């Protein structure tokens, strides 16, 4: 199994023309405002349809989009290692722990029902974000991403961050939408100037659909 998401150096979600504001999880969890993206299986990410032009965009546009998707698929070809069984991690400098400390992962983390339950509990979102960012290329990362998408979160490849609408977009086209969004800042604070691992608000932000990740691929 291969998760299409990878940890990489991403641009910070900060711009001079935008306002970033740290908020609590209660403020972040707003009413259902729809999913970021287009509402067309032919044109990409699933979301709200704001215009009838989406269904009548023309054959040329469809062909261009298909070529783009083929290019993306080419860069995500399965690798030989994807068929290998996962190897257990062996620490180079093991720490002495008490006998009661777990030595292996609990089997429940391989149970899809467990992650579905986590996704239904708003205050368990930290678990999903932790699995996504700190369990790279694992089944846990895959199911965490899947559950986040069920809750209307969308992964932005450019910023390596998850976004969700905070208000209905002011502008929405077939290519992008503009408005106010909640995003999860996964960075860990290392000084007094940064506050990481929290929900933040991005105002007057233009979200380009081309940067949104599609469904995780098994």
Image (cartoon, grey):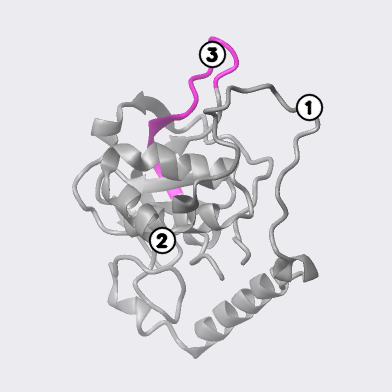
Placement of the C terminus among the 4 image quadrants? bottom right
Q: Is residue 10 left or right of residue 129?
A: right
Q: Residue at x 64, y 41 (%)?
A: 10
Query: How many labels, in total?
Result: 3
Describe residue 167's horizontal placement relative to residue 69 as left or right. left
Identify the residue at the far front of this view: 99
In terms of sequence position, does the residue under pointer 1 or pointer 3 come before the other?
1
Q: Which residue is found at the position 36% from the left and 48% from the top?
A: 164
Observer-nearest residue: 76 or 113?
A: 113
Foreground: 178 or 67? 67
Residue labelled with disc 2: 112
Tell me the quarter of the picture where residue 99 sits. top right
Please rate how many residues cluster around mark 1, counting C-alpha atoms within 10 Å: few if below 14, some from 14 to 19, many from 20. few
* 160 over 24 or under it: above or below: below
* Cα distance between the residues tagged 2 and 1: 32 Å
One can see residue 208 in this view: no
In the rendered structure, find residue 93 and report the number of the disc placed on it.
1
Magenta stretch contains residue 88: no
């Amino acid at each position: 199994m291969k998760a299409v998401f990878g940890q990489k150096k991403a641009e910070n979600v900060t711009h001079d023309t935008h306002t970033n504001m740290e908020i609590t999880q209660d403020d972040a969890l707003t009413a259902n405002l729809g999913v970021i993206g287009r509402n067309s299986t032919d044109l990409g990410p699933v979301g709200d349809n704001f215009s009838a032009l989406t269904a009548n965009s023309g054959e040329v546009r469809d062909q261009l989009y298909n070529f783009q998707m083929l290019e993306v698929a080419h860069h995500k070809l399965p690798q030989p290692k994807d068929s290998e069984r996962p190897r257990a991690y062996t620490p180079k400098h093991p720490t002495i722990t008490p006998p009661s400390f777990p030595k292996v992962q609990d089997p429940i983390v391989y149970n899809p029902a467990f992650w579905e339950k986590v996704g239904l509990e708003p205050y368990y979102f930290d678990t999903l974000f932790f699995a996504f960012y700190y369990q790279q290329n694992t089944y846990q990362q895959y199911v965490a991403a899947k559950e986040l998408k069920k809750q209307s979160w969308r992964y932005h490849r450019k910023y390596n961050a998850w976004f969700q609408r905070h208000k209905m977009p002011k502008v929405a086209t077939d290519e992008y939408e503009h408005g106010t969004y909640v995003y999860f800042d996964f960075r860990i604070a290392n000084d007094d100037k940064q506050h990481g691992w929290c929900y933040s608000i991005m105002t007057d932000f233009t979200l380009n659909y081309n940067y949104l990740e599609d469904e995780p691929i098994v």
